[in-house]
Structure formats: C-alpha cells, structure tokens
Amino acid sequence: MAVDPLTNIGALLAAYPHLASLIREISVMGGSFFEEATSIIPAEWNIRNNPLAAKIVFDSGIPVRVVGLDVTLKLKIKCTNFIRIPHPDILKPVIMNAEMFLERTNDMYFHDPLAAVCLFDENVCRFIQGNIGVGVDSASWGTTGFSKNLTGRVRVADIVYPEKFYNAYYSIDDAAYVITQ
C-alpha cells in the first residue's frame, strides 16, 4: 500500500521492470479524479510530489486500486469529536495526530486510513475500472485524469460508504464505535 509519493515503487519498476509480473496489486491513496475534487485540488499531494513515478506505476500494467481525494474528502470529522470518544490502544498515535491538527483546524480527514481499510474490506467504497493519466509537463504537473475502460488495469474509488468505513475502522481491537459530526 502506498500512501506517499510513489517514488520508491516507480524507481523499483524503472530499474527492474521484470518484477512487475510478481506484484499482484498496488493500493494507492492519491490523485484527484472527478470534478468534485479536481475543482478544489487539481493536483493531490502524493501524486504532485512525484508525478513521473506515479506515471510509471499507473502505466506499468500492474493492477492498481486507487483511493483519491474524491472519496477521502467525504470522511470529514471534527477533531474534538474524534478525541473525546474512547479508542483502543492501537489508535493512540492517531489521537496524538488529531490533537496536533487542532492547532490548525478542527477538521480531520481519513485519507490514508480509508486506503488501509480498503485492503481488508473493499466494500467500503465502490470502484470503477479504467485508466489513469498523470500530468508530467509544466502546465499539468501532478494532475490526474481517469477514463473508464473495462479492460483498464486501474480501479478508482468513486463512492465511499461512510458508515461502512467507520464500522470497519473502529472494529480494530474488537471495539466498535460510531462517530457523529
């Protein structure tokens, strides 16, 4: 699972392209694909910081599952609400991160956690199949575009089911919690 720029994976595939056949799937949190998100953030951070590596990954022929800003921006909660509910010990680092967010904003998004939850329960999102293009020239640097294609090797989440996500996320350590805004 990749939750940062795709530099390491892109470098691996560029140096050793024959290894692509050994990789079953790459899961990525990155990109901005549909109008709702691209109008706000046309070039998402993980892709914008190394679009050349992202292009290598998306063009590699390896199946890629992508969770972009289009769906992660729909998982917004208030940090104060998140902090006040009980959490299993395994989530203490997340709580500390939420407390740091309070210094700047009370809004918190589950960008990387959504990509992680999809590894275990893909049904928290709806995925559509197609191809991703990555802007690598100066005018489009780091932007991403998606085109539906039933033979494409990329699946992009276009819908998230928040209740399913929160139930899966909070089922960690056999504890179930519900977040309300």
Image: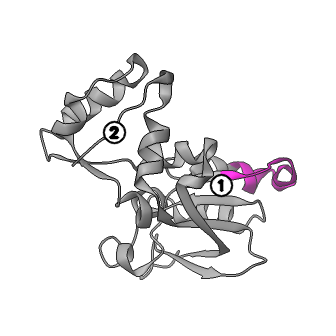
Which of the numbered marks, if any, corresponds to residue 178?
2
x, y percent for residue 71: 43, 62
Q: Which residue is mark 1?
A: 10
Left or right: where 81 falls relative to 6: left
Left or right: where 15 falls relative to 88: right
- Which image quadrant is residue 167 in? top left
Magenta region includes residue 49: no
What amino acid type is highlighted by mark number 2?
Val
In the rendered image, the vertical position of residue 73 relative to residue 12, given as above or below: below
What amino acid type is highlighted by mark number 1?
Gly
In the rendered image, the vertical position of residue 95 relative to residue 157, given as above or below: above
Q: Which residues are magenta?
A: 12-26
Mark closest to the chain's N terminus, 2 or 1: 1
x, y percent for residue 175: 44, 25
* Residue at 66% in and 49% down: 9
Q: Does dot 1 land on a helix, a strand or a loop?
A: helix
Q: Nearer the viewer, residue 161 or 40?
A: 161
Magenta region includes residue 25: yes
Q: Main secondary structure of the magenta part?
A: helix
Q: Does dot 2 land on a helix, a strand or a loop?
A: loop
